[in-house]
């Protein structure tokens, strides 16, 4: 019996020694950070967001234009968040897209997973809803890159009369349709993502067409109505980034209108990037990751320690007294 007790005590001591490296463990725990930049950012909309006209632009690639506002912000937030977490930017904008096209894309379900995981959505949409009514008139007036005044010798009179006759009604219908689509778009986004949604207002690229007052005045009135629709339908479902205010009086410098192209140039994209950045960084974003907590004893360690203590108690309480009685 004595030998058996000694063997048990020795076994616990040896086992305790051999498994010392597994006596502690560190559990994974959630750690949250409050950030001023969104870890995951999404852009939706039309050619303005898709960086049309910039160096590196292709119809299939929204990520190779370093001067686009989406990619400017991608680079900035990647740098800002480098020490804490990765940054991800997704740009699903499509050149030529109307509000109806965006509504169809959102309802298709193709973006559901991405929307569920993003921290902010920035939308530029609606310009094509209006331009499809205005561009034909500019073309019929004989206005080109080389000639920015009305060319009487090249005017298609019958086409122009027909367009002007229905223009007001066509634009009114386009604005009404845009308002319906905007409500649907923001309603769908409200359901499919929990993040903040931002809608950009539209600048008037024709503000300096002083020699063609009809175009300037008509587009000014129309775009004011367009932006009023955006401003009057927030309903707490989205926030506004007022690009129109930032471009006002500067469209000659910030767009390619000199080439009869309404899209922002590199300087214009920089201005948009600053406006979007100001809106996004005014918010707080929560990023949660898992880290290892403080070391603590494993269940095996507790058993071994208890067994070791028991073994020592056996030695002290049982074995040693027996040994002394043996030699009395």
Image (spheres, rainbow, N blue to C red):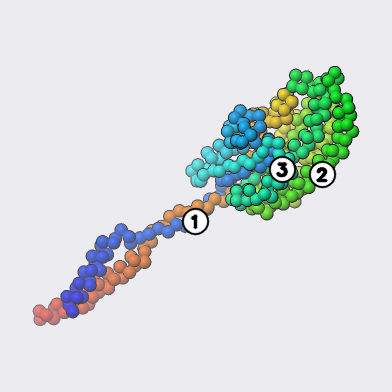
For label 2, the SS is helix
Q: Quadrant of residue 53?
A: top right
Q: Spatial distance from mark 2 to mark 3, Cα to Cα?
A: 16 Å
Q: x, y percentage for residue 212?
A: 83, 25
Q: Spatial distance from mark 3 to mark 1, Cα to Cα?
A: 40 Å
Q: Quadrant of the N terminus?
A: bottom left
For label 3, the residue is: 101
- The residue positioned 74% from the left and 25% from the top of the image is 260
Q: In this picture, is 197 found above or below 96?
A: below
For label 2, the residue is: 176
The reply to whether discs 3 and 1 touch (Cβ–Cβ < 8 Å) is no
Judge left or right: residue 300 versus residue 316. Answer: right
Residue 6 seen in this snapshot: yes
- The residue positioned 77% from the left and 40% from the top of the image is 227
Judge left or right: residue 39 versus residue 138. Answer: left
For label 3, the SS is helix
Q: Quadrant of the C terminus?
A: bottom left
- The residue positioned 25% from the left and 74% from the top of the image is 313
Q: How many marks?
A: 3
Q: x, y percentage for residue 272?
A: 66, 35
Q: Nearer the viewer, mark 3 or mark 1?
A: 3
Q: Spatial distance from mark 2 to mark 1, Cα to Cα?
A: 48 Å
For label 1, the SS is strand
Residue in the foreground of this view, choosing between 288 and 154: 154
Q: x, y percentage for residue 178?
A: 78, 43
2 or 1: tag closer to the N-terminus: 1
Q: Nearer the viewer, mark 2 or mark 1?
A: 2
For label 1, the residue is: 30
């Amino acid at each position: 019996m004595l030998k058996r007790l000694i063997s048990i005590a020795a076994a616990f001591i040896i086992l305790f020694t051999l498994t010392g490296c597994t006596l502690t463990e560190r559990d994974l725990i959630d750690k949250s950070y409050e950030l001023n930049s969104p870890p995951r950012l999404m852009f939706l909309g039309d050619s303005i967001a898709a960086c049309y006209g910039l160096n590196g632009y292709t119809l299939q690639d929204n990520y190779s234009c370093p001067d686009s506002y989406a990619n400017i912000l991608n680079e900035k937030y990647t740098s800002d968040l480098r020490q804490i977490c990765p940054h991800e930017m997704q740009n699903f904008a499509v050149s030529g897209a109307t509000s109806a096209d965006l509504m169809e894309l959102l309802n298709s379900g193709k973006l559901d997973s991405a929307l569920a995981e993003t921290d902010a959505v920035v939308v530029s949409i609606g310009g094509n809803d209006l331009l499809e009514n205005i561009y034909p008139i500019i073309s019929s007036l004989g206005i080109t890159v080389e000639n920015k005044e009305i060319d009487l010798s090249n005017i298609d009179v019958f086409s122009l009369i027909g367009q002007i006759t229905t223009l007001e009604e066509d634009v009114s219908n386009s604005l009404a349709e845009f308002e319906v689509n905007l409500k649907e778009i923001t309603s769908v986004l409200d359901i499919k993502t929990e993040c903040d949604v931002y809608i950009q207002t539209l600048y008037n690229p024709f503000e300096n067409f002083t020699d063609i007052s009809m175009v300037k005045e008509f587009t000014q009135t129309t775009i004011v109505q367009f932006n009023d629709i955006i401003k009057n339908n927030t309903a707490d479902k989205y926030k506004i980034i007022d690009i129109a205010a930032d471009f006002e009086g500067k469209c000659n410098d910030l767009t390619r209108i000199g080439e009869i192209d309404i899209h922002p140039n590199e300087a214009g994209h920089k201005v948009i990037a600053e406006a979007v950045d100001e809106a996004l960084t005014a918010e707080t974003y929560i990023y949660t990751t898992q880290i290892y907590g403080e070391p603590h004893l494993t269940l095996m360690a507790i058993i071994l320690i208890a067994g070791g203590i028991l073994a020592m108690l056996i030695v002290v309480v049982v074995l040693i007294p027996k040994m002394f009685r043996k030699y009395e």
